Image (cartoon, rainbow, N blue to C red):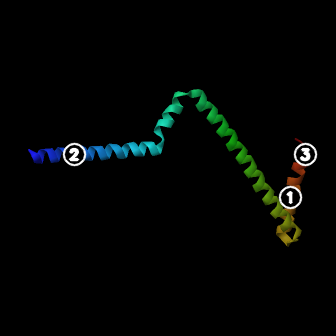
Amino acid sequence: MAEEMTSTDDKLNAVYRLTRGLAQQMEKARIAEYTELLRSPWRLIWLNIVSGMARGLGIALGFTFFAATIIYVLQVLGALNLPIIGDYIADIVRIVQHQLELKTF
């Protein structure tokens, strides 16, 4: 009979450890916060709007920085007067500058 109690206690301890591990993993995954967010659709919409605007602003700033860097490098390469590449790069820089002058914001 004592052996049955030990076996049952071992099984209960194993179930307890498993349940506790699952609860800790759910806490790490923030399941409760996610389900609470799903219960308030207006908050979910607001968070999506704000995150979309932040993402759009980041893309715009990143592309502007990238394009400015590329144009700067092309201008430096064009100033070196490399025989074939220099003319090609100078044409690209002229086209880009012409497009920038046409657009008035």
Three-letter amino acid code of the residue under disc 2: Lys
- Say which of 59 and 80 sits in front: 59
Q: Name above or below for residue 92 compared with residue 25.
A: below
- Say which of 42 and 66 sits in front: 42
- Say which of 4 and 60 sits in front: 4
Distance from Cα at disc 1 to Cα at disc 2: 75 Å
Residue under the image location 18 percent in, 44 percent down: 8
Q: Name above or below for residue 82 compared with residue 90.
A: below
Q: Residues within 10 Å of mark 3 (few under 14, many from 20)?
A: few
Q: Name above or below for residue 23 compared with residue 67.
A: above
Q: Nearer the viewer, mark 1 or mark 2?
A: 2
The residue singled out by tag 1 in the image is 93
Distance from Cα at disc 1 to Cα at disc 3: 14 Å
Helix, strand or loop at disc 1?
helix
Q: Quadrant of residue 47?
A: top right
What numbered label is drawn on residue 11? 2
Q: Residues within 10 Å of mark 2 (few under 14, many from 20)?
A: few
What numbered label is drawn on residue 102? 3
Residue under the image location 71 percent in, 47 percent down: 58
x and y, in percent, of residue 23 in the image = 39, 42
Residue under the image location 16 percent in, 47 percent down: 7
Of all residues shown, which one is farthest toward the left? 1
